[in-house]
Image (spheres, coloured by chain):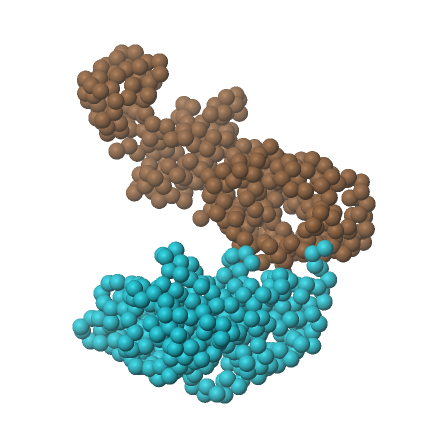
Chain colours: A cyan, B brown
Amino acid sequence: MREIYFDNSSTTKPSQAVVDIVIKTMTKDYGNPSSLHRKGVDAERYVSAARKAVASTLRADLREIVFTSGGTESNNMAIIGAAYALRRRGKRILATSMEHPAVAEVLTFLKNEGFTVEEVPVDGRGRIDLDDLRERLDEDVIVLSTMYVNNEIGAVLPVKEIAGILRERSPHALYHVDAIQAYGKYRIHPGQLGIDLMSASGHKLHGPKGTGFLYIRRGTRIVPLIYGGGQQGGLRSGTENVPGIAGLGVAAAEAYRDFDAKTDRLYGLKERLEKGLREIPDVVIHSPEGREGAPHILHASFLGVGSEVLLHSLEDRGIYISAGSACSTHKRNASPTMKAIGAPKEEVSSGVRFSFSETNTEEEVDLVLQALRELLPQLRRYRAK
Amino acid sequence: MFHTFLIKYGEIGIKGNNRHVFEDALAKQVRLRLAHVNGEFEIRKERGRIYVECGGGWDEEETVSALTRVFGIVGICPVHTYPLTEIGELRARMVEYVKEEHPDSTASFKVKARRVNKEYPHESMEIDAELGEAILMACPKMHVDVHHPDILFDLEIRDRVYVYSKVIPGPGGMPVGSNGSAMRCLSGGIDSPVAGWMIAKRGVKIDAVYFHAPPYTSERAKQKVIDLAKAVARYTGPIRLHVVNFTDIQLAIYDTCPHEELTIIMRRFMMRIAEHFARKDGDLGIVTGESIGQVASQTMQSLITTNAAVSMPVYRPLIGFDKSEIVDIAKQIDTYETSILPYEDCCTIFVAKHPVTKPVTEIIERSEAKLKGQIEELVETAIRTTETFTVRPE
């Protein structure tokens, strides 16, 4: 059966170049970058090259990049590290109400540690009101964390404006951006945007799982979470995951190659699917239209069909999509964004996410639409009475 | 260090002329179970006892854990064996044993010797007295209580001397395979693995059937059932599992029958298919995890209606149990954590808001009659496309 993978916001297939360099660093150049001998120096080169590749996509300094085990660790390190570094300056920590659990749960932890955690509400399209934000900010705020691209519906936040408002209202505060769904899809130059800390993940852009990085603007002090041999400037001890980091470096460079063409291609796929879905009755689309939203995410609710039932029906035809956020499907009713945007229960329980990579094709979109047109009448016949 | 276990069994001992059948079945189960444990084991049956001799890098904890999962075993006694020597030497050995197994004990004790080897020059009573005295002299904090001792030192004088004083409780019951076999309906919930375990405890070998309803239930739900079968197989040995694709039958019932009767009619078809596989596998009954009144489909009336669909006996070992009691057993046999994984919420469309709680068989049969002409083929297809495989303990 032909496989159509439309779940690229959950994870992506590693590119061949990524696989090649991972194999090479596991079979030939397997040294420890901290070793003094040649094996160590060879391994160190991979880490430096990856750092350079990532830094150049961000127009950042090499010292501003810390490699981590992925997006979740980056988020933890940024928010907890910033909160503790600034705990004498204030106690308020703000984030939007639609953050991924990798941010939201960190905030719950900090709340229990005695910090004051507050949510910035979003509207039905996942937008925040900048005037409202301005009013909420004051000198007691030490951390503001927002997504760049929302993982469920693909809403995009105006990070530059947010950074400006934060700078003006809360001079001590650090701005953390969870760019896990955005890095590789947008040209992000954090220094220029006013971002202090930014999290990204490798496996969302055809890199290996278990890899990611945190951008830390030069001069920003955060308290490390992991202590040990003092690797990565003491910010993240532990022998570097050389194969993972090397793979991430390759994936980062590839993501920004032919960037504009790829972006157009993704928007083309999204718009094609969106157009097709609008022709199907009782479909509610939650993603912002066209270029207002991210190029690779389309969220839709097929009223009257349980999202998991639709997921398994499509799976039966070799089509892979996501019901809610893949990281949280183990919890019942877990869909923080849908809740935050105030979607009615019926839309939450029938919501699914299609997410593309540049390797998907228009033909695949047409096949998915075809499958939906065939499946939905049958599935809608059987609903809870 | 000991390297022998004495296996105590309860009910088997009183089964008259069939006794050897049950003993053989138990010895076989012990052998099968230990085949998965590191080490070399020799199982000996000897004058109404089963001994397990351990060697070849065996691990005590692993061996005991395996034995505590063999139905039919009431107690597992670690036995020390010593060469058969004159009484003075035996006194020294006994003291050595007490100091090793019960160091610094202040307990009361009794020595009870059995002289199986009549060539040994001292009678049982004499041995008791000699060894009791030796223990008292060496361990002045211990004292003798012949009526209610804290520790009973059992000795058997054979070609060697066997000493034991500890009994690790076994699961009880009867050896699997000594009482026929049954078909268990597995759902993935908390109850059905416990029901299977309880029937197996009475010596019944179990097969299992699971009703899969893609896309309304996921591959993960199926994997969960396989994992539960694996957990139970640690007690019962390999289980033959039939995975039936039930979706089309469910949809036909949904289309044709009153919605509030959906669950009960569905269960009747499940029972029929279970019965089919039970007969095929040579089983003597069907096992379910129902307990009276737990849900609408488990009222007395519902059970009558479910039973009426099949002619084979339906065994319901949990019938008088409260949920909390079932949960306790599920935790004890290590199926609980798997059972509570939430992978089956998709079936909700097949659950009515107000299902019948007091179905009348005749009325249900009338509703079912509307399915005539289409359901036969669906059932046949479900049976024909059933996936059957053996789940082995890990």
Q: Residue at x 42, y 77 (%)?
A: A165
State left or right for residue B267 relative to residue A353: right
Residue A208 at x, y percent in the picture: 40, 71
Between residues B327 and A361, which one lies in front from this camera angle?
A: B327
State left or right for residue A263 relative to residue B112: right
Residue B65 at x, y percent in the picture: 39, 39
State left or right for residue A83 relative to residue A133: left
Between residues A85 and B230, which one lies in front from this camera angle?
A: A85
Does A144 sit above or below residue B126? below
Q: Residue at x 41, y 39 (%)?
A: B66
Q: Residue at x 37, y 67 (%)?
A: A140
For the N terminus of chain A, the quadrant is bottom right
- Res. A8 visible in picture: no
Q: Residue at x 34, y 42 (%)?
A: B39
State left or right for residue A9 relative to residue A216: right
- Res. B324 visible in picture: yes
Residue B84, picture quadrant: top left
Residue A238 at x, y percent in the picture: 27, 65
Between residues A291 and B9, which one lies in front from this camera angle?
A: A291
Does B235 sit above or below residue A292? above
Residue B363, picture quadrant: top right
Q: How many marks?
A: 0
Residue A131 at x, y percent in the picture: 49, 75
For the C terminus of chain A, the quadrant is bottom right
